[in-house]
Image (cartoon, grey):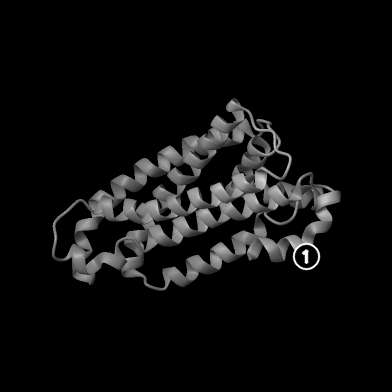
Amino acid sequence: MTFMVLYIVFSKFKGGWVENYQMYLLLGIILYTFVNEGIIFGMNGILQIAHIILKVNFPREIALASSLIMAVINLTINLFILALFGLFNPVSPTLVTLGYFILIIGVIFALIYGISFFTSLILVNLRDLQHIAELIMQLLFYATPIFYPIESLPEYIQKIVKLNPLTVLIQAAREALIYGNIKYLNEVGLLLFVSILLFFLGSLYFKNNVKRIAEKF
């Protein structure tokens, strides 16, 4: 429904700045939804099963991973829908660009996982974080070229928007999956390094602090 509304309103881009606007828009919505669900699900991963954590001794990382797997399952379903759209729209991915697309998904997942290590524990102490995160994700939707092409923005605004990691990842994914191009390779490589570092630091923070949360429930 989100896709239909945005497509009807902004379909003028189909014949303007954006080639194959249907796939452009749908892929943008799918990747944003993956990030949004991953952040929200991961943040609530510990709090939602607090009653189990207090009774059963098991690695708490499993609770976090299970929450993120839900976002991955939804992403898989949405990508299947995207593939159906691709049967009726011109797309030109190659094996190399498909591999690049999978790498981008891996970077996004690692970033979400790393962030969730921190937010899942912070939420236990600061319950209002959930409302703050929802507001930030809503603002991020408009700050990312999901339903509009980045080329439609003034040049100085484009430079600001490109500082948003989600902008780079979504644009790179579109180029790879829809147009068969590999772009933003340096930026994606940098984000890959950042995601691995964030995952490592988040894991250490989680392991050192997760045992202290029982008293908060």
Q: Is residue 114 above or below residue 189?
A: below
Question: Which residue is painted at 47% across and 54% down in the image?
Answer: 74
Judged left or right of residue 75, residue 54 is: left
| Residue at far right of view | 16
Determine if residue 43 is in view: yes
Between 61 and 165, the one lying in front of the other is 61
Between 76 and 196, the one lying in front of the other is 76
Q: Tell me which corner region of the image, top left, top right, bottom left or bottom right, holds residue 99.
A: top right
Determine if residue 160 is in view: no
Q: How many marks?
A: 1
Q: Is residue 216 above or below residue 80?
A: below
Q: Is residue 191 above or below residue 27?
A: above
Judged left or right of residue 45, residue 182 is: right
Question: Which residue is painted at 51% across and 54% down in the image?
Answer: 35
Q: Tell me which corner region of the image, top left, top right, bottom left or bottom right, holds residue 174.
A: top right
Amino acid type of the residue tagged 1 in the rendering: Val
Question: Which residue is painted at 80% across and 58% down in the image?
Answer: 11
Question: Which residue is painted at 47% across and 35% down in the image?
Answer: 193
Between 85 and 37, the one lying in front of the other is 85
- Residue 135, image x and y in percent? 54, 69
- Residue 6, image x and y in percent? 71, 63
Q: Which residue is mark 1?
A: 9
Q: Quadrant for the N terminus, please.
A: bottom right
Q: Is residue 176 above or below residue 15?
A: above
Q: Is disc 1 placed on a helix, strand or loop? A: helix
Q: Quadrant for the C terminus, please.
A: bottom left
| Residue at far top of view | 96
- Residue 158, image x and y in percent? 74, 49
Judged left or right of residue 57, residue 148 is: right
- Residue 80, image x and y in percent? 54, 47
Q: Residues within 10 Å of mark 1 (few under 14, many from 20)?
A: few
